[in-house]
Amino acid sequence: DTEVTQTPKHLVMGMTNKKSLKCEQHMGHRAMYWYKQKAKKPPELMFVYSYEKLSINESVPSRFSPECPNSSLLNLHLHALQPEDSALYLCASSRTDRLRNTIYFGEGSWLTVV
Amino acid sequence: SQQGEEDPQALSIQEGENATMNCSYKTSINNLQWYRQNSGRGLVHLILIRSNEREKHSGRLRVTLDTSKKSSSLLITASRAADTASYFCATDGAGNTGKLIFGQGTTLQVKP
């Protein structure tokens, strides 16, 4: 069972809406990640937070805005999205961002932009 | 960009048979991880194998790593219908920067 919790599981939003995806872990992990996954494709990295600081932004459009309020929480703020942004958004965490550590994923948030 | 290539893209077997999936990658790595994803669900971590390891077992899973060939394989023995899922390998690209790069995945169907 995953110990990374994502809410909501499903989200439908219009192109002018502002919404947020939330992620929480209580494993004491200091690295957290956002991935985007389109149907029948592998996950693609969007952002990495290490010790609550953004360490990697994979050239993600500014309509996606990550936030790490504390070591247990990770948010992804969404604004003015496009229909092609519809995807499964996966949050993950690991003990640190040194990749000798296992990365644990949540169940994901299905986003549909209409 | 995706580093890994997985082979085959799709695999269909009968319950009780073994399933082998292969993963190739392009750059040096520190470790390689295998994940399972049931349809519409999150990724479940299966095994992490380090670059100085050649083989690792976990229950019915056996993973091998050949760094000279830049390839890994995942063997599932005595498959069950519940093993039906997509399987992804993921590498760190040796940068150790928190960037996990996934292969394209193998879709496994186990028929009861």
Image: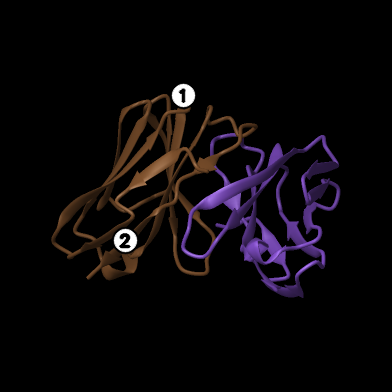
Pointer 1 with pointer 2, Cβ within 8 A: no
Which residue lies at the image location 57% right of the left edge and 45% below the top edge?
A: B100
Q: Nearer the viewer, residue A12 or A77?
A: A12
Question: Looking at numbered disc 2 in the image, what kind of residue is underneath it?
Answer: Leu
Say which mark, if any, is on residue A113.
none
Circle 2 SS class:
strand
Q: Nearer the viewer, residue B74 or B17?
A: B17
Say which mark, if any, is on residue A111.
2
In brown, which chain?
A
**The C terminus of chain A: image quadrant:** bottom left
Which residue lies at the image location 17% right of the left edge and 65% below the top edge?
A: A14
Which of the chains bears the disc numbered 1?
A
x then y, percent, for residue A30 = 46, 26
x then y, percent, for residue B17 = 82, 68
**Picture quadrant of residue A54:** top left
Question: Looking at numbered disc 1 in the image, what kind of residue is underneath it?
Answer: Gly
x then y, percent, for residue B73 = 79, 55
Other residues around mark 1 within 10 Å, as few (<14) / some (14–19) / many (≥20): few
Which of the chains bears the disc numbered 2?
A
Give the answer, above or below, for where A54 lies relative to B19.
above
Residue picked out by circle 1: A28
Tags 1 and 2 on a common chain: yes
Query: In the image, is B5 to the left or to the right of A56?
Result: right
User: Please, which residue is most extreme toward the left here?
Assistant: A16
Query: In the image, is B64 to the left or to the right of A109?
Result: right
Circle 1 SS class:
loop
In the rendered structure, which disc, 1 or 2, sits on the residue that comes first in sequence? 1
Give the answer, above or below, for where B65 lies relative to B5.
above
Q: Colour of chain B?
A: purple
x then y, percent, for residue B86 = 61, 63
